[in-house]
Image (cartoon, grey):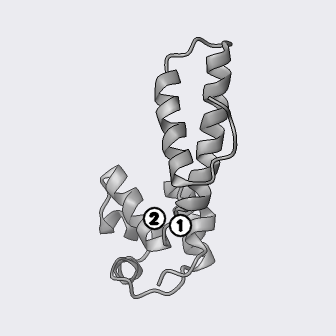
Amino acid sequence: MEIRPIKTVEDHRAALARIDQLMDAQEGSHDAIELELLAILVERYEIEVFPIEAPSPLDAIRFRMEQAGLGQADLARVLGSRSRASEIMNGNVKRLSITQIRRLHSAWRIPAEILIRDVA
């Protein structure tokens, strides 16, 4: 396959089909190099054509809670306030405070750049 930029849906499909053919390429071979280059081109195309927006702070908090099997009481412990945890979980908070962002980032490793966005 001639390697060139992926600009159309057809180019994308063809690149994915070729990647499937090359998945078992032996490291260091011409096929492995082609596979790596195609993967880079497909990734670039998909980032441009199918962008994924960062989650809202509330979505990130809920996701982390679900992942770790945590509940609202756990959030209240991290924040030091049951009422604030309730407000956040009910979507009644527009922005988290710097203290809340720091606590959530430190305790649950939620990226701070996600938490500083507007909640609503």
Residue neighbourhood size for the residue with mark 2, other residues' Cα within 10 Å, grouped as few (<14), some (14–19), many (≥20): some
The residue at which mark 1 appears reads as 53
Q: Position of residue 59 (x, y in %)?
A: 42, 68
Q: Is residue 44 left or right of residue 89?
A: right
The answer to which quarter of the image holds residue 88 is bottom left
Q: Earlier in the sequence, mark 1 or mark 2?
A: 1
Kind of residue sitting beneath label 2: Ala
Q: Is 38 above or below relative to 61? A: above
Mark 1, mark 2: which one is toward the viewer? Answer: 1
Residue 42 lies, with reference to residue 21, above or below; the image says below
- Does the rendering let one see residue 77? no
The answer to whether marks 1 and 2 mark residues whose Cβ atoms lie closer than 8 Å is no
Label 1 sits on a secondary structure element that is loop
- Write the residue at 56% across / 46% down: 11
The residue shown at (51%, 53%) is: 9
Residue drawn at point x = 67 percent, y = 32 percent: 2
Residue at the image position 58 percent from the left and 11 percent from the top: 26
- Residue 60 in the image, given as x and y percentages of width and height: 45, 64
Front residue of 72/3: it is 3
Q: Is residue 116 above or below residue 17?
A: below
Q: Residue 77 occupies which quadrant of the picture?
A: bottom left
SS class of the residue under badge 2? helix
Tell me the residue that label 2 is attached to: 60
What is the distance, in whole Å, between disc 1 and disc 2 at their CAs?
Answer: 12 Å
Q: Nearer the viewer, residue 9 or 75?
A: 9
